[in-house]
Image (cartoon, grey):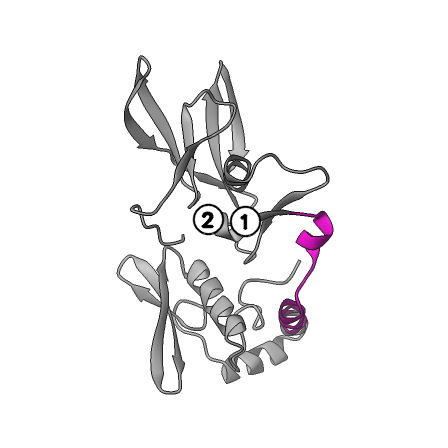
Amino acid sequence: MIEIDEQTERWKPVPGFGGWYDVSDMGRMRLSRARGNIRVSHHILKLFKKSGYLCVNLSYAGRKKMWYIHRLVLETFRGPCPPEMEAIHIDEDRLNNSLRNLKWGTHKENMGMPLARRRNSKAAKLCYQNPEARKKTSASHPVGKSGYRGVVRNGRGWQATIKVDGRMIHIGRFDSARLAALAWDRHVRKHKLPRMTNRGLGLFGPPV
């Protein structure tokens, strides 16, 4: 998951639930416990995954329904979804539901692939179609015990690091090796470093 600073995290009531639920700009959900009209405590809700997205079950007025966190964040902080628009994860990480990583966009925009991603997807397809090529490519760009490049175990989490000009850069600490690998890839693309990404090596699985 993303790192959360509770001092700067912003919370807002989710529209349409009578003030019973709040969502934060970092993608967390909480139940507002109340006594009469006075809120006395908050309870952070447990999220679950469905189709790769984080979700939550909310009950109100006798009805229980599943909601996607990314849509709750956008609808609460940015307003209702405009016609013919859908939620977009800017960094393509479905688990990163921070407000700065979300926006409303068209389906064409959501399905569009940046040049760097197209190149990486092509390399990944070649790796999966040709096992010998994949073996050779992986040998040229070794991965660690985590199964990804630039990712190592750090206590109960996973650390993403990269060495540039003899200096070790700590990108961040994450709850899973996959999230750390995604962050490592983003860092490589952002700074245009001459590295083959984890996605380019096909380490996230075959492109779909």
Q: Which mark is residue 152?
A: none
Q: Is residue 74 left or right of residue 33?
A: right
For badge 1, the amino acid type reads Leu
Predominant SS along the magenta part: helix
Amino acid carrying label 2: it is Ser
Q: Which residue is mark 1?
A: 102
**Residue appearing at x 54%, y 72% in the figure:** 189
Q: Are the residues flagged by discs 1 and 2 in contact, CB closer than 8 Å?
A: yes
Report the magenta residues as a range: 105-124
Residue 118 lies, with reference to residue 45, above or below; the image says: below
Query: Could you tell whether 90 is left or right of 97 in the image?
Result: right
Q: Name the residue rendered at 63%, 73% in the picture.
A: 127
Q: Quadrant of the C terminus?
A: bottom right
> Left or right of 143: which side holds 102?
right
In the image, residue 80 lies in the stretch drawn in magenta = no
Q: Nearer the viewer, residue 52 or 86?
A: 86
Q: Which residue is mark 2?
A: 98
**Residue 12 placement (x, y as % from top left):** 42, 34
- Quarter assignment of residue 74: top right
Which residue is found at the position 31% from the left and 12% from the top? 36
Q: Position of residue 32 (x, y in %)?
A: 35, 26
